[in-house]
């Protein structure tokens, strides 16, 4: 973007201004992209959940009710902005902004397509975790500033949930860091090229005879980092197809549901218990800001899950188109952006589906689920991920002569790693589930129990 | 670019100082915590300005995401917010200003005066900068500074165990809150125990009052 602008108006403006304008433009594009998706998501959620509940949903405004979100937006704009008399006026005002801003900041590091990446941050994964933690402050401000017990209860629940589900989420993302050997999000889709399960390890034997439609140059893949090779690339070497990636994806997606306050975990805004949680005292645009923040958070978390485990923009045909060169590179970029969007929407559909299927958890169930099931699974998964990296990349000298896989071809090493980690992960999952399903020991003798007066 | 960075640095420094001053002078303790958060953000931005991305992000993650949320939790869970009525300044505030300022300058002035400042530092030839990324920090923790790292880890573990010990209640003193169904079942069982030979009809009627009282509580 900077280069395009430079070529257009290079001489007229100082360089730093061009850089600034370029970043501003990119920011605007990304924000409009997210808000457009938000509008569609609101509509889709209402229609899909209505279909699941055997209702019609909004179907009057526009074709199939498509313009309903716009009508809602107009309503939100024109609503009266009510601030409770005893509220802390400034905190009450700032809370929705503090809740929305970090969520919008998360969008900055996601690679939206092949070559379409707003910012190359080398600590992108940590950055996303860090800024998503900030939105907890906004919720806390909303709960406290409203001067309302329901709002405070909701904020407490929200932040407790955020803080405790951050740990499984981060631990699941750590497997990605171990696999990728770095925290940049931009490299992740490139690393997930190849074919399912095997990744980009099926090499081209004869460089002249390999069609550029099927084989592409892969620089970094497990087995030979930094050494470009020709590998069979269908754009399907997503990590979710390996045992490590699958378990990591499950844990991360469930934790993302909790962070995005989606239904099995929508305890902070349980309407039937505490009205609407921290949003109780908000109306008009401030309420809409919270609403946008939530949907964009779900959007960003889906994008993150897709990028980290489902290959991001990687998909069949992207590498082939990019290899054809010339204007086809832009077609490849558009196709890759479409793939990422499709993955995000499939994940979002699963979120709606879960909302239609599951009742709300209790607080103690929520905590038990995070600490007794998700966290141990994620920890085991890190061990598996390390083994995977070791089995596919390390030389026997690095293993200290313990394991010698130097003579094997990359696909053989990959197969060994997949089998070993599959055994570990399945055994661990089975064991942890069995522990959790064991009936709880009678911790309390019947005689000791006293009925409260 | 250098002037731009200087301007940004001045802006961030002003934000940090202003929020830090607000933190200690504002009367409402929750507001103080919020100003503290803004100050943390400024420090994170300074790290980013120095291109220490990992440190900047870690600053936001640890201080804003964890420490200040804990502070907010602690403030909101304690009942007494009456601190806002208290005076912030004692009559002898000027002594309290002078003494720490003198001590601090005792520390900082010799360092500032004697240190050979080289701005910007000359880049070491053929070497990556000392702390730029997560990998260098990780390597430093695992190799050069393994002992301090382990000591810190043990210290944190001890603190965690200590927190559990403090928060742990003796089993006899713990009281679990029974659900309504459990209360009803308990009452039934107690009544059955009191009547050693329960006939079927009175037992059925005896359930009902207990259910009524159970739903009252």
Image: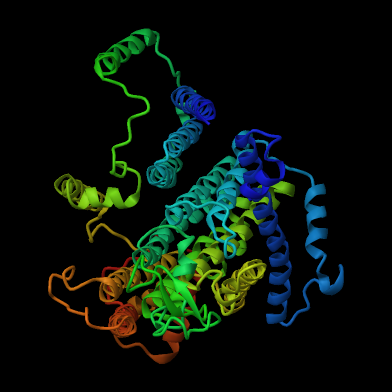
Query: Which of A209 and B144 lies nearest the eye of the viewer?
Result: A209
Task: Give the x, y percent position of residue A213.
Answer: 56, 81
Which residue is depicted at the point 42% across and 54% down?
A: A126
Query: Which of A240 and B104 lies nearest the eye of the viewer?
Result: A240
Please, which colouring scheme is shown? rainbow
Residue A149 visible? The answer is no
Check the image and report above or below for A153 versus A89: below
Looking at the image, residue A385 sits to the left or right of residue B180; the answer is left
Query: Which of A61 and A444 lies nearest the eye of the viewer?
Result: A61
Query: Which of A421 and A267 lies nearest the eye of the viewer?
Result: A421
Looking at the image, residue A20 sits to the left or right of residue B132; the answer is right
The extreme bottom residue here reads B200
Task: Give the x, y percent position of residue A92.
Answer: 62, 40
Residue A421 visible? The answer is yes
Which residue is depicted at the point 82% across and 70% down?
A: A65
Looking at the image, residue A198 sits to the left or right of residue B137; the answer is right
Task: Give the x, y percent position of residue A400.
Answer: 13, 70
Residue A422: quadrant of the picture: bottom left
The extreme front residue here reads A208
Which residue is depicted at the point 61% across and 70% down?
A: A325
Report how many numbered discs are placed on residues in the image: 0
Which residue is depicted at the point 62% across and 71% down?
A: A332
Task: Give the x, y percent position of residue B126.
Answer: 29, 43
**Image quadrant for the C terminus of chain A?**
bottom left
Check the image and report above or below for B181 versus A205: above
């Amino acid at each position: 973007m900077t280069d395009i602008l430079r070529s257009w108006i290079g001489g007229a403006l100082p360089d730093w201004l061009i850089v600034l304008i370029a970043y501003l433009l990119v920011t605007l594009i990304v924000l409009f992209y997210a808000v457009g998706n938000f509008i569609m998501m609101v509509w889709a959620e209402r229609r899909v959940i209505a279909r699941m509940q055997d209702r019609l949903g909004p179907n009057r405004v526009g074709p199939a009710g498509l313009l309903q979100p716009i009508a809602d937006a107009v309503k939100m704009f024109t609503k009266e902005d009510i601030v409770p008399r005893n509220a802390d006026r400034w905190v009450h005002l700032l809370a929705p902004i503090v809740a929305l801003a970090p969520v919008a900041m998360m969008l900055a590091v996601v690679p939206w397509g092949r070559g379409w990446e707003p910012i190359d941050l080398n600590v992108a994964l940590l950055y996303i975790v860090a800024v998503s933690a900030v939105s907890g402050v906004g919720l806390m401000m909303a709960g406290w500033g409203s001067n309302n017990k329901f709002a405070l209860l909701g904020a407490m629940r929200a932040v407790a949930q955020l803080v405790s589900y951050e740990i499984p989420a981060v631990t699941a993302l750590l497997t990605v860091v171990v696999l990728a050997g770095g925290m940049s999000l931009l490299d992740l889709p490139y690393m997930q090229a190849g074919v399912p399960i095997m990744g980009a390890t099926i090499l081209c034997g004869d460089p002249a005879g390999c069609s550029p439609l099927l084989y592409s140059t892969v620089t970094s893949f497990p087995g030979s980092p930094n050494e470009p090779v020709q590998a069979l690339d269908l754009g399907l070497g997503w990590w979710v197809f390996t045992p490590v990636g699958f378990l990591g994806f499950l844990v991360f997606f469930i934790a993302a549901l909790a962070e995005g306050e989606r239904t099995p975990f929508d305890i902070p805004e349980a309407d039937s218990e505490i009205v609407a949680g921290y949003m109780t005292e908000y109306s008009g645009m401030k309420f809409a800001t919270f609403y946008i923040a939530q949907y964009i958070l779900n959007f960003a978390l889906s994008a993150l899950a897709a990028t980290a485990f489902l290959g991001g923009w990687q998909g069949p045909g992207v590498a082939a188109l990019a290899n054809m060169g010339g204007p086809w590179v832009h077609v490849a970029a558009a196709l890759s952006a479409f793939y990422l969007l499709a993955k995000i929407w499939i994940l979002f559909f699963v979120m709606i589906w879960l909302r239609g299927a599951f009742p709300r958890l209790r607080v103690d169930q929520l905590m038990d689920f995070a600490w007794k099931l998700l966290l141990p699974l994620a920890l085991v998964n890190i061990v598996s991920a390390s083994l995977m990296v070791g089995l596919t990349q390390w030389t026997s000298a690095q293993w200290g002569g313990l394991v010698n896989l130097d003579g094997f071809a990359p696909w053989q090493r990959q197969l060994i790693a997949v089998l070993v980690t599959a055994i570990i992960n399945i055994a661990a999952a089975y064991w942890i589930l069995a522990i959790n399903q064991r009936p709880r020991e009678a911790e309390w003798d019947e005689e000791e129990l006293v009925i409260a007066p | 670019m250098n002037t731009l960075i200087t301007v940004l640095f001045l802006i961030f420094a002003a934000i940090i100082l202003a929020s830090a001053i607000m933190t200690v002078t504002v009367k409402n303790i929750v507001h103080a915590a919020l100003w503290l958060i803004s100050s943390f953000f400024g420090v994170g931005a300074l790290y980013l300005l120095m291109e220490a991305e990992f440190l900047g992000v870690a600053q936001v993650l640890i201080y804003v995401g964890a420490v200040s949320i804990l502070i907010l939790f602690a403030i909101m869970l304690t009942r007494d917010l009456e601190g806002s009525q208290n005076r912030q300044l004692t009559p002898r505030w000027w002594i309290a200003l002078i003494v720490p300022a003198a001590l601090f300058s005792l520390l900082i002035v010799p360092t500032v005066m004697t240190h050979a400042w080289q701005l910007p530092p000359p880049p070491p030839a053929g070497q990556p900068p000392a702390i730029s990324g997560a990998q260098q920090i990780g390597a430093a923790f695992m190799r050069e500074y393994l002992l301090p790292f382990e000591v810190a880890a043990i210290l944190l573990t001890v603190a965690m165990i200590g927190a559990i010990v403090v928060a742990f209640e003796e089993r006899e003193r713990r009281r679990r809150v029974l659900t309504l169904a459990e209360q009803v079942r308990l009452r039934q069982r107690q009544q059955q125990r009191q009547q050693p030979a329960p006939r079927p009809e009175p037992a059925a009627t005896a359930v009902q009052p207990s259910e009524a009282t159970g739903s009252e509580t």
